[in-house]
Amino acid sequence: MLARRFALYLDLIRWNRPAGWLLLLWPTLGALWFAADGWPGWHLLAVFTLGTFLMRSAGCCVNDVADRDFDRHVKRTAQRPVTSGAMSVKEALGLGAVLALLSFGLVLTTNRTTVLWSFAALAITLIYPFAKRFVSIPQAVLGIAFSFGIPMAFAAVQSTVPAFAWWLLAGNLFWVLAYDTEYAMVDRDDDLKIGMKTSAITFGRFDVAAVMASYAIFLAVWIWAGASRSLGVLFYVGIAAAVAQALWHWRLIHDRTREGCFKAFRENHWLGFAVFVGIVVGYALR
């Protein structure tokens, strides 16, 4: 019985689908390197890696509770623990609260500025699941939520959040818009039936163009960031690898097949990883 409950908890937090938390991790760690002007130290690396995983898992709990009445109408999500009735709303929210508290415990090992910013991060995490009912492009709200590790990384290192951090957040928001629009393209037909608002629906026939423009803006901002820190040629090798992946994603999504769009979404963490490795190597060899 305990093994069965534990398996449900792992399913709820998407344990077997790590792409989700990796999408949050790479820009957060990239920002940590920028904030520290190089190696940030083991303590902050551990805090932000574990904290990213815990908060993304807590967000899954809240999201599945908020979307349980919608998810049952979508084949891909109908068997999620809360939607299928295998787990109660109270139990899912309880798990989410425990995970969020564990993450907050990690934040308490940093400084007061980071602690204060963590409350804003939590608020955005709680708001996003409900944005899909009211905002035409809820992926923009997700973009803020998924990018909030960036200002928190600067707060942890510098005890302040400079304009540079907000530029990184703005750029990363467009990456989130790109990959979550790909994700929304998978479920567009189902979302239209149930009245869900998504960027794939809002962009309509310009969805592919919007995805590629978003990739371009994201990469342009982070290229500027690396150039401003004189990271050198190997940083641009990482960027080139990211550009190549973005072009490959265009091939996957331009026919708008469910399989192609979902594969593009699932593989996006490698694009972020390429940018992150470029930053790390650029600093190491600067």
Image: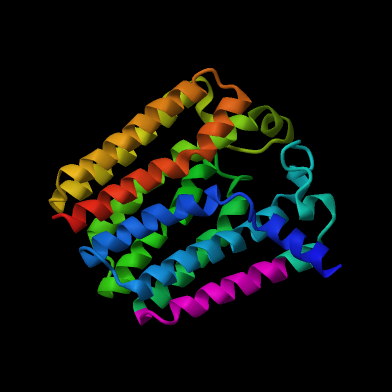
- 45 on left or right of 80: left
> Residue 199, can we see it?
no
- The quarter of the picture where residue 118 lies is bottom left
Name the image quarter holding the C terminus.
bottom left
Residue 157 can be seen in this image? yes
Q: Quadrant of residue 165?
A: bottom left
Vertical placement of residue 175 versus 119, above or below? above
Question: Residue sitting at 55 percent across and 32 percent down?
Answer: 263
Most foreground residue, 147 or 133 = 147
Look at 65% across and 60% down and name the residue there: 62
Q: Position of residue 223 (x, y in %)?
A: 23, 43
Q: Is residue 64 magenta?
A: no
Residue drawn at the location 69% of the way across and 69% of the way down:
95
Residue 252 screen position, x and y as percent:
50, 24
Name the residue nearer the viewer: 234 or 8: 234
Residue at point 78%, 43% (across, down): 78
Residue range in magenta is: 93-112
Q: Of residues 1 and 124, which is closer to you in this image?
A: 1
| Residue 274 image-quadrant placement | top left
Q: In this image, 166 relative to 262: left or right? A: left
Q: Which quadrant is home to the N terminus? A: bottom right
Q: Is 234 located above or below residue 49 in the figure?
A: above
Q: Main secondary structure of the magenta part?
A: helix
